[in-house]
Image (cartoon, helix red, strand yellow):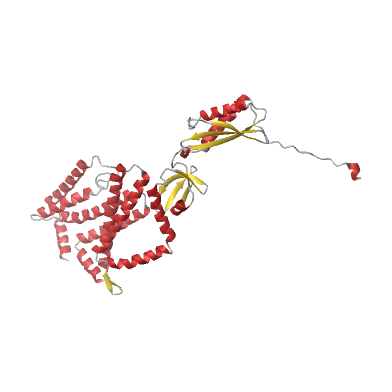
Amino acid sequence: MDELGRFINDLDHGPTAWDVGALVACLLVAYGICWLTGRKRPRDSVWFGRALVDGVLFPLLALALTYSARLVVGEYHATPLLRIAVPVLVALAGIRLLARVFTVVFPGSAAARLVERVFSWVAWIAAALWIMGLLPPVMAEMEKIQFAFGKSHITLLTVVQGTLSCGAVLVLALWISAALEHRVLSQHMNDLSLRKVAANAIRAVLLLLGLLFALSAVGVDLTALSVLGGALGVGLGFGLQKLAANYVSGFVILAERSLRIGDTVRVDGFEGTVMDIKTRYTLIRSLSGRESIVPNEKLITERIENLSLADSRILLTVDVAVGYDSDVDLVQRILVDAAKASERVLAEPEPAARLARFGADGLEFSLLFWIADPSNGQLNVRSEINLRVLADFRAAGIDIPYPQRVVHVKQQDLSSRA
């Protein structure tokens, strides 16, 4: 309780001019360094944040300068303000690191925001205990609370320290993986699918190494994990085989590039654009706005139509029927001209109109044309051409026949009935 008594005594006498001036100078110098080095910062910078002071660099610089000023000024004057500022800046640096990394790695995640709030409360409570000198007694009491797991005894302090250590290592691993993805992979890998599989692999390896390092740092015997690994393997072989197959299939799809983000595919009659390839499933979005979540194993084991794997061009067909007395050459010319008038129809291969069959009600023609952008829709270009064909047929006097049926009515002889 000596620390608490000295803290109360320092507050009674109030901060000195040297104390206030040193703290203000430290904050100004830290802000100046951030401003000079962060003028060309990226928008998602972990170091600088969005407004220089909400990144990691500002509280770290302010902490280093404030701690140095406390050591120097404390030799000659009381420094209650600097003494308070040190734990506050430590807590602020930890909160900023967690918040900025989670913002970059998990944008818009509600779970990430919840973890950030919980850590913020823990950090500020720890800072308050540190300032009042109550942190060592609290840690001593936590050391006395023990949990027995068989022959092993674990204290509450060890659990808290292990959790914080694992969290810190995992946050640093996420930060490193995000930095590699944004700075290295985005510059040297133009293919989005390859970049995603490389980013997922790097993140998984870093998280695994970080978790093992954190467990080893808090005294966990890693050899005991071999038993857990064997049990996990058995579980994957039986109960989790579908889940494991989906995860493996996700990496196979990304590595083989059989499906790429942005491809137009058809799965079980559902046609759309591949929006994202997760480790467990692939998200496909149709032009109507509907989204389909397809397990990755299905994309590996079943037949999938990729409309843009080798060539994004696709062939579309418009069917129309005209009367038997129509000029066939004129009909073909109108159909081809209507297709050529559309901006989305390719000039090569050239549109063509063919007499498909002699129908029951008229001559049935098929207009064949190619487009290179199926992701922009197919019904809209068909509708545009149909409207133009209808207008040209009416202008040329070409009849589109209605379905006709001949009904024969047989009258029975009334005299024979009598």
- Residue 13 placement: quadrant: bottom left
- Taking the spot 54% from the left edge, 35% from the top edge, the residue there is 382
- Taking the spot 34% from the left edge, 65% from the top edge, the residue there is 229
Q: Name, please, the residue furthest toward the left.
A: 76
| Quadrant location of the N terminus in the rendered image | bottom left
Q: Nearer the viewer, residue 265 or 119?
A: 265
Q: Position of residue 93 (x, y in %)?
A: 23, 53
Q: Nearer the viewer, residue 153 or 394?
A: 394
Q: How many marks?
A: 0
Q: Position of residue 398 (x, y in %)?
A: 63, 27
- Taking the spot 18% from the left edge, 50% from the top edge, the residue there is 62
Q: Is residue 21 depicted above or below 131 in this figure?
A: above
| Quadrant location of the C terminus in the rendered image | top right
Image position of 258 (left or right of 9): right
Q: Position of residue 10 (x, y in %)?
A: 14, 58
Image position of 415 (left or right of 33): right
Q: Position of residue 220 (x, y in %)?
A: 26, 66
Q: Is residue 401 depicted above or below 55 in this figure?
A: above
- Taking the spot 41% from the left edge, 63% from the top edge, the residue there is 237
